[in-house]
């Protein structure tokens, strides 16, 4: 039965064939048509709880990147791009257009960024389009992201590295979150700041 489910995931929701047997999910979970997983390593895992609805595109950019979803998590057509990982607790709403990004992508040093450009082009040509195959991650800051239970993230928000969204918090549409969000608060703006206490 598991092989049939993985085959359908491959065919219907665009999951990378090498990755499909690394998706573990609970009863009642649904994958929306936009759901997909791209990975650099077969060691990555996606663990999903019960009764979730996921339309997110997951991109694992590191061999140890992890993706954990609790129960009753809804994520619309959004993006998760991780080198280290991301964890969602339960009862979470994430609108469409949200981006979770757990690293800086490049060094602050322009000389190192020049090397990145050269390496990307070389990797793209040699590794069938995988332009980060030999990326130097040692010079890139990266920290996991955590989204606590009962939180809500509005459309087109951006959640950056190392952020924890507290329990029951709300992130307003188009907010850029660079620091932890306290529990039961509403944050808005760029950079996001607390605009309301909920408790």
Image (spheres, rainbow, N blue to C red):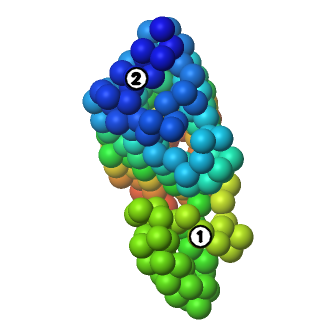
Q: Nearer the viewer, mark 1 or mark 2?
A: 2
Q: Which residue is mark 1?
A: 135
Q: Are marks 1 and 2 in contact (CB under 8 Å)?
A: no
In the rendered structure, the answer to whether residue 150 lies left or right of residue 96 reads right
Q: Which residue is mark 2?
A: 7
In the rendered image, the quadrant that contains the C terminus is top right
The quarter holding residue 75 reads: top left
Return the residue nearer the eye: 40 or 186.
40
Where is residue 92 drawn, in percent x and y? 49, 26
Q: Is residue 48 above or below residue 181?
A: above
Q: Is residue 118 above or below residue 198?
A: below
Q: Label 1, label 2: how many angstroms apart (C-alpha)? A: 31 Å
In the rendered structure, the answer to whether residue 183 lies left or right of residue 25 reads right
- Mark 1, residues whose alpha carbon is within 10 Å: few (<14), some, or many (≥20)? some
Mark drawn on residue 149: none
Q: Residue at the location (66% across, 67% down)?
A: 137
Who comes first in sequence, dot 1 or dot 2?
A: 2
Q: Residue at the location (62% across, 54% down)?
A: 62
Number of disc labels: 2
Where is residue 24 drawn, in percent x and y? 57, 22
């Amino acid at each position: 039965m598991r092989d049939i489910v993985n085959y359908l995931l491959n065919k219907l929701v665009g999951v990378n064939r090498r990755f499909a047997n690394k998706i573990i999910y609970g009863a009642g979970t649904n994958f929306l048509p936009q759901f997909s997983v791209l990975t650099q390593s077969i060691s990555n895992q996606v663990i999903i709880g019960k009764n979730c609805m996921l339309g997110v595109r997951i991109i694992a950019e590191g061999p140890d990147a992890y993706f954990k979803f609790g129960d009753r998590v809804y994520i619309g057509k959004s993006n998760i791009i991780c080198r280290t990982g991301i964890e969602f607790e339960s009862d979470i709403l994430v609108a469409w257009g949200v981006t979770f990004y757990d690293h800086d992508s490049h060094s602050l040093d322009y000389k190192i960024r020049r090397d990145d450009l050269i390496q990307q082009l070389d990797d793209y040509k040699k590794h069938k389009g995988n332009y980060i195959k030999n990326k130097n991650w040692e010079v890139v800051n990266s920290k996991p992201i955590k989204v606590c239970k009962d939180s809500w993230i509005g459309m087109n928000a951006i959640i950056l590295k190392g952020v924890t969204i507290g329990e029951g918090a709300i992130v307003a549409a188009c907010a850029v979150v660079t620091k932890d969000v306290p529990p039961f608060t509403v944050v808005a703006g760029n950079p996001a700041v607390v605009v309301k206490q909920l408790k």
